[in-house]
Structure formats: structure tokens, C-alpha cells
Image: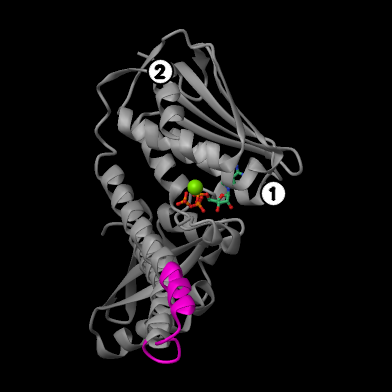
Amino acid sequence: MISVTSLPFPVMLIDETQTVAAISPALAGVLGSHVVGRHYINALRQPITLEAIETSLRSGQPLQTRWLGRDGARDTTWAVHIVPEGRRVILTFEDRTAAEEVGQLRRDFVANVSHELRTPLTALQGFIETLRGAARNDATARERFLGIMERETLRMTQLVDDLLSLSRVEEGERMRPVAAVDLGALVAATLGDLEPVIAASGVVVTLTDASNGTQVRADANQIRQVIGNLIENAIKYGGSAGVLNINLDSATYHRGLRSEGLALHVQDHGPGIAQHHIPRLTERFYRVDTHRSRALGGTGLGLAIVKHIVNRHRGRLVIDSTLGQGTTCTVILPTI
Ligand SMILES: Nc1ncnc2c1ncn2[C@@H]1O[C@H](COP(=O)(O)OP(=O)(O)OP(=O)(O)O)[C@@H](O)[C@H]1O
Ligand SMILES: [Mg+2]
């Protein structure tokens, strides 16, 4: 007979006295080897799992159930296959954590998108009603409401554009860009495109370029999007200090890339971001101050898009911030 302890996947054998007779090393890693010799109720504890084992024992039929574990800070989900053999039972555990997490991400994403769309839609509905009723003959009110309706429509368009952009970037993430791009020239060109935005903000932008025409493998359009997003953020959330510095270093070895790279820094001197927010900024829809971001027309997708683009380029995104002093976002791209 094969011994349970030699099996390469998580297995438990429960004997006639309902005691855990043996577990495989893979399951010992999950439950701890101390459960051997204990009643299975003490080893597994969760009512749903225990009930299924009892039912299976009573009926003599195999059953499948769930068991929820914990691995450090992470919740784990297991499918448990119960196979009774007389008055003994063999349980095999199958790790379903990754599939559960993907499902959870998808549910969160759909909930977020729905919520982001619902707010402007509710506003539009309200204004349409008002324009049909109370404000029907009030030209001033009508103009004002149409202005708000236009803004809300723009916000929805922006959200849909960002969502499409994100899904396009994700789709192409496995394909490395092939074009040779002079990063300094691209930064200068992007700044040119942003001239109207910069002028309207009144923020002074300085550019120091030490890259000397060094080329990177890049998708120029996507890198424009990255630079644009970082500069827009710096203006929107850090522009209060009036100055924004953009620095492009000379090419040098970067440990994070394990190769030579070019680093682009977008530095503002605004209020900064508290440390605990920083790791979450690249999550979809994550904002430090949701109200402020929305008021400024933000969708909370900008840095998520940036992160995916930088990943596609096998580069690094580093966000460094000190409260009261400002934020520096750095993108490092491998040179050719
Ligand atoms: N330079 C900065 N200084 C302070 N906070 C910032 C800075 N850059 C980003 N943030 C914070 O990070 C959040 C996420 O930024 P992100 O670019 O992903 O979204 P957004 O700017 O709100 O929307 P979008 O970029 O889609 O217009 C912002 O809402 C803001 O709270
Ligand atoms: Mg942004």
C-alpha cells in the first residue's frame, strides 16, 4: 500500500477512530505536523468541512468541500476532495487561492467601474429632470446645468478612454517594444504637447537633460503617456509650490534592472504623499483624496496605466515622497 506521507501533494488520512493517522509533507506545511494523532475535528475545525466529512462517511460517497486557510497575511482557499474507504477517509487538498484572488479582483473592478459611472449618470439624470421641469424657462439656470452636464459627460468619456487604454496596454504587455527612441527628445516633445496645460496651471517647469541622446527600446506613444501622466499629476497634486523639475540622468547601471538604464525624474514640491499610500497608488482607482481627484477630473487609473507601460518596457517605477516636501516619481528604462 502507498503511504500517504510519500505523496507529493497535500493529503490527509483519517482512521477508523476519526484520528488523523497521517498527512503528507505538503499538507504539514499548511496545517502543521502536530495535527497527526489528533481528532480530525481539531485539525480542521471549520464546520462546512467537518459536515462534509461526516456526510461522506455516512453515505459512503465521495464529496467535495472547501477549507479556508491562512498563509502569513494571505487568506488561502482549498478545494477538499473527500474519499471514504469503509470507516476511514482520505482527504486531498487542492489550492484554489490564485483562482479565488483573480475572481475577487474582477468583482472589485466591476464594482469600481460601476460606481465611477453611476455618480455622473445620477447627476445627468437629475439635471435632465430639472431642465424639463423647474428650470424649463430659466435661461441662466439652463446654461449652468448644461455646463455641468458637459463636464460629467467628459468625465465618463475620460473613464472609458482610460479603461480602454489600460486593457490595450495589458494585452500587449508580453510584447517588448522594438523601436529605438531618444528619450531626451521624447521628453522635450511631450513637454511641448503639454504646453497649454502647463501654461494654464501657472506652474514653472524646468528640464535638465544629461542623457546625451541615449536611446531606449520603447513604444514612443506609450512613453509619452507615462511622461504626460506623471507631469499632470505633479501639476494637479503637487503644483501648489509653483515649480516642477524634470531631470533626465545620464545612462548608468541600475541594480533594479540588472542592466544599464536611463532614469527620468519628475519632482514636485507639493504636499507629498503619506508613506502608507505609496505602495497602493498604482492600483486601479486608488486615490489618496478621492474627492479632490474627482474634482480635478481624475479617474484614478493614471498610475495603473503608467505601471503597466513601464512593466512592458521591463523598466521600473519608483515613487518617493516626503510629507510637506514633495514627491518624486522616477521611471527607469533599459537602454539599448
Ligand atoms: N505628485 C503627486 N503628489 C501628491 N499626490 C499624488 C501625486 N501623484 C499622484 N498622487 C495621488 O495618487 C492618486 C493616483 O494617481 P493617478 O494618476 O493614478 O490617478 P488620478 O490622477 O486621480 O486620475 P487620472 O490620472 O486618471 O486622471 C491621485 O489621485 C493622487 O491622490
Ligand atoms: Mg493622474
- First to last magenta residue range: 132-148
Which of 303 and 133 lies nearest the eye of the viewer?
Answer: 133
Q: Residues within 10 Å of mark 2 (few under 14, many from 20)?
A: some
Q: Is residue 81 left or right of residue 187?
A: left
Compared to residue 47, the image places residue 216 above or below, namely above
Query: Which label number is shown at residue 185?
Result: 2
Query: Is residue 139 located in the magenta-colored stretch of the structure?
Result: yes
Residue 189, located in which quarter of the rendered image?
Answer: top left
Q: Residue at x 41, y 61 (%)?
A: 155
Query: Which numbered disc, 2 or 1, marks the residue that appears first in the sequence?
Result: 2
What amino acid is found at the position of numbered circle 2 in the picture?
A: Ala
Residue 333: image location, x then y, percent: 43, 23
Residue at image position (26%, 36%) is 174
Left or right, 260 with respect to 265, comes to left
Q: Is residue 115 left or right of residue 290?
A: left
Asked whether residue 326 is in view, the answer is yes
Magenta stretch, main secondary structure, is helix
**What mark, if any, has residue 227 been given in the picture?**
none
Q: Point out which mark residue 274 bears.
A: 1
The picture places residue 10, in percent across and down from the top left corner, at: 37, 58
Looking at the rendered structure, the kind of residue marked 1 is: Ala
